[in-house]
Image: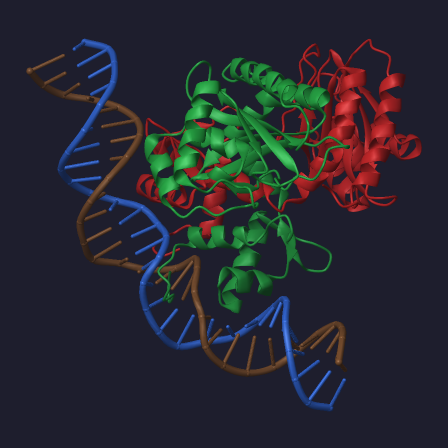
Chain colours: A red, B green, C blue, D brown
Amino acid sequence: MANSPSGETVTERIVRVLETFDTDRTVQTASGIGRRAGLPSSTAHRMVADLVECGLLERDEEHRVRLGMRLWELALRGSHALRLRQAALPFMERVQARVREHTQLAVLENDETLFVERLSHPQAGANITRIAGRLPLHASSSGLVLLAHGPRELQDRVLGAPLEAVSPETVTDPARLRRILAGIRRDGVVVAPGTVETVSTGVAVPVREGRGRVIAALSVVLPREAPTRPAVDELRAAAAGISAAVGAHLP
Amino acid sequence: MANSPSGETVTERIVRVLETFDTDRTVQTASGIGRRAGLPSSTAHRMVADLVECGLLERDEEHRVRLGMRLWELALRGSHALRLRQAALPFMERVQARVREHTQLAVLENDETLFVERLSHPQAGANITRIAGRLPLHASSSGLVLLAHGPRELQDRVLGAPLEAVSPETVTDPARLRRILAGIRRDGVVVAPGTVETVSTGVAVPVREGRGRVIAALSVVLPREAPTRPAVDELRAAAAGISAAVGAHLP
DNA sequence: GAGCGCTTCCCGTTGAACGGGAAGCGCCGT
DNA sequence: ACGGCGCTTCCCGTTCAACGGGAAGCGCTC
């Protein structure tokens, strides 16, 4: 940019500004955004004013800043995630009604697990995943499914890098993980006890595009001691339904 | 911008690029985006490459362009719409299960009705509203509720401008509309037959933040001849539930 | 094989963007 | 009352990222 020593593009900076928002920080001051995004104060104020002008950000009553509805609209209108979500939702509701636990849909994004939808049952236990939240690929049942069906390079890249444990029981040994991935490809399901939280077991199945490529993972989070068989059956049926619905013309 | 006769900001242009995507056009060529956004070809190609670099756009197998998951993530993480939606979803599911018709949640955005969530019943009829879709405020039951509870200036502005009919029965007479709005404030509900489509009736109620300000409208779309009373009761109960859930700490 | 549309590379031009500085404002704690 | 702190707004000289016209390459279809 002009007079900027940074050599970044405006686009990169906008993304950095948007990145400063998350579930725990939905409203910020312009200065705070600048600090977190590593921008000079005057630049941050100018950019925020610019983004507000375009509707990507909004100001509340106290002059503070939050993400704009316009951004939400632009991101969803025409998005593939929405299409997938719409196809999946009826089936997810059915799973959730029968299994009565957290039900979630995840996709692969930039070598991580990105959760696209999540239904929570009122009586279900804790669950750290959130819509638009991420987890490492090796550290959740959904991620393991996505990794197992991802390209070979992805597996090598992920398993080659240092693997952090999310809970004390997260498997971080590459050799053991490779055996787990092989099991997923063989069985079409993974049961991952304690991977995310010690008290719960994740159960996940792949969702295919028609009969082909795996495009998502569908999972439930069960209490550690619950039987897994009923959940597996529900998930398999739902995944098949979603596969059929994706690609068909949606209402 | 440098060497640009336009006098626009980069941000505006990015928004214009994102605006070229919608439900019916989820994949485009870079040239097509440029044409629709009114950008010179070389500029469009550079911008698209830039946006792809940052993850806001993605390329598919045929080099074509679609909205990126990263954009989806940034827009939702930390968004107020998501919070509202999460609070509303369980109640909307209940409405949908009982009424068995399209159920939708809308907010006011830039003098229009913006639909934030929609659940469709498999057996329900057609419905032109879409998630992240818009309708004029006077032209849907949800919009009428939002307009009725909006600030006075909003009503004057909207009713002062020329009002387009969406269906042959859309009410476009300002005086009649003002009576309808008064009725909504008095009754806490609107029944709007044929406003959006001749074959259906929209029924909508306000959703309040706690006991105060109206933050959204909850609606169902019934076949024209269906009784409205059961739907009204369900909607009122659901709206009360959502009001209680919003503001409470969400799981 | 000519025509068309999408894409990529090149390159001289230039004004939008940059960011340091300073002053205004509101809110604390003393 | 006052000084300090943080957020914000305005100003303004500097400058390089962004711009966009042009041309050539590529893969279609007619």
Q: Quadrant of the N terminus of chain A?
A: bottom left
In the rendered image, residue A97, in percent from the top left (x then y), is placed at 77, 18
Q: Is residue D6 left or right of residue A71?
A: left
Q: Quadrant of residue A132?
A: top right
Count the labels in the image.
0
Task: Please give the name of the residue rendered at 81% of the width and 44% of the height, measured from the top-left corner.
Answer: A152
Of A251 and A192, nearer the camera is A251
* Residue B37 % position (x, y): 50, 60
State left or right for residue B108 relative to residue A53.
right
Q: Nearer the viewer, residue A208 or A203?
A: A208
Which residue lies at the image location 36% right of the left edge and 67% below the top edge?
Answer: B5
Left or right position of A228 against B15: right
**Residue A228 found in image quarter:** top right
Q: Quick check: can you spot residue B77?
A: no
> Would you identify the image quadrant in which residue A202 lies?
top right
Residue at image location 61% in from the left, 38% down from the top: B131
Q: Position of residue A34 (x, y in %)?
A: 38, 37
What is the quadrant of the C terminus of chain A in the image?
A: top right
**Direction from residue A196 to residue B146 in the image, left or right:** left
Q: Quick one: B245 or B4, which is closer to the camera?
A: B245
Most foreground residue, B80 or A20: B80
**Residue A28 percent location from the top left of the image:** 40, 29
- Residue B246 visible? The answer is yes
